[in-house]
Image: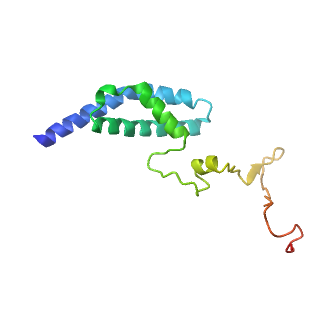
């Protein structure tokens, strides 16, 4: 009997979140409307995952009566914008992490760019200004 009651309540809770989902998606879409399509879809998915986790935490604390779609979505959007991803630690030492790039003001660029006239790809040479070698290949003293 207890297992049945737990299953029914989790189904009700999932249906409650599903009822909130369209409003959460709408707010996330508005928040990230200036992003490119692929990135926007990824950010919207992150917002939904973050909102669901926040929803579950509120339900576990028996605060279901204070759950509304708009504050839940706004909280999740702020979490995603600050670099907090679901299932990922915020690693300041990982240069591919959005959190590290924001914290250390790191810019990543592709080494390959299309030639404008011929449509071919060419490799760009990147010079490290902190290198100890001089331009002619010899060691600087």
Task: Give the residue furthest to the right.
Answer: 136
Vertical placement of residue 80 versus 97, above or below = above
Q: How is the image coloured?
A: rainbow
User: Where residue 120 appears, x then y in whole percent?
Assistant: 78, 50
Question: Is 110 or 108 nearer to us in this picture?
Answer: 108
Residue drawn at x 30%, y 31% is 63
* Residue 91 figure quarter: bottom right
Q: How many marks?
A: 0
Q: Judge left or right: residue 117 versus residue 78.
A: right
Residue drawn at x 54%, y 44% is 83
Figure quadrant of the N terminus: top left
Figure quadrant of the C terminus: bottom right
Question: Is 133 or 18 nearer to us in this picture?
Answer: 133
Residue drawn at x 79%, y 66% is 131
Task: Give the residue furthest to the left.
Answer: 1
User: Where residue 17 appears, x then y in whole percent?
Assistant: 34, 31
Residue drawn at x 19%, y 35% is 8
Q: Judge left or right: residue 109 versus residue 75.
A: right
* Residue 35 figure quarter: top right
User: Where residue 42 appears, x then y in whole percent?
Assistant: 52, 40
Vertical placement of residue 134 versus 42, above or below = below
Vertical placement of residue 139 versus 71, above or below = below
């Amino acid at each position: 009997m207890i297992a049945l009651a737990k299953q029914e309540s989790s189904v009700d809770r999932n249906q409650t979140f599903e009822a909130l989902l369209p409003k959460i998606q709408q707010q996330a879409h508005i928040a990230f409307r200036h992003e490119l399509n692929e990135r926007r879809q990824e950010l919207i998915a992150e917002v939904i995952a973050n909102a669901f986790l926040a929803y579950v935490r509120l339900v576990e604390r028996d605060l279901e009566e204070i759950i509304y779609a708009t504050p839940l979505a706004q909280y999740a959007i702020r979490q995603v914008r600050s670099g907090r991803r679901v299932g990922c630690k915020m690693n300041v030492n990982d240069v591919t992490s959005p959190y590290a790039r924001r914290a250390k003001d790191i810019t990543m660029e592709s080494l390959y760019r299309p030639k404008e006239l011929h449509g071919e790809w060419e490799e760009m040479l990147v010079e490290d200004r902190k290198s100890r070698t001089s331009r002619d290949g010899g060691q600087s003293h």
